[in-house]
Image: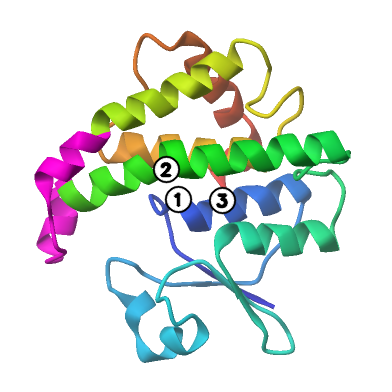
Amino acid sequence: MIYYDSPNPAPNPRRVRIFAAEKGIELPTQMVSITAREQKSPEFMALNPRGQTPALQLDDGTVIAESIAICRYLEALHPAPSLFGATPAALGTIEMWCRRIEMVVMEPVGKIWVHTHPYTERLGLHVHKEYGEWNRPRLRAGYKMCETALAETAFIAGADYSIADIILLTTVDFATFIGEPLPADMPHLTEWHARVTARPSSAA
């Protein structure tokens, strides 16, 4: 098994590292430099035609790409502690929050990154700055959704830490990297962020 990883600030590879650290799983790793465009090399594209990290190559040659798919595979191999939900209700609630964070928080972060950040502009991506700016209030609305939930629960999907917290943590940290830190008027989200950042796995 080989885990094709990329260093911070790339949020999706970090999701898997945090997940594995929470489980106590050691993944044999090969680093892929995004800044050097190694993810677009013919060798890596043969593994993952999308040209994105992360990817997990199994011993039989099977390649699993997409961070959450990799985490689901690892959860099936190492079910305890459960990070996708140990009961039907927890499983459904965690899945709901995974989708909400992806669609309502991470999606505008990605648009801000691609369409407003100087680094992506230097890469020659097709930039629409007005569209990128339009996504800033969308991100704030996503943060507000999380703030409201965290006023009622210790973690984003309930009483227990889960994959949903990992997705949100890596999203918030990447947003901070691109110049969109947590708003000062969201104390529950800020306190949650401090707690999950203090977990040893967050350094993975």
Q: CA distance from mark 1 to mark 3?
A: 6 Å
Which numbered tag is attached to residue 64? none
Which residue type carries mark 3?
Arg
Which secondary structure, mark 2?
Answer: helix
Q: Are marks 1 and 3 in contact (CB under 8 Å)?
A: yes
Q: Position of residue 78 (x, y in %)?
A: 84, 57
Q: Residues within 10 Å of mark 2 (few under 14, many from 20)?
A: many
Q: Which residue is label 2 attached to? A: 106
Residue 179 in view (yes/no)? no
Q: Which residue is mark 1?
A: 11
Pick whichever of labels 3 and 2 is earlier in the sequence: 3
Q: Upstream in the sequence, badge 1 or badge 2? A: 1
Q: What element does badge 1 sit on?
A: helix
The circle on residue 15 is 3
Q: Is residue 178 above or below residue 27?
A: above
Q: Nearer the viewer, residue 26 or 188?
A: 188
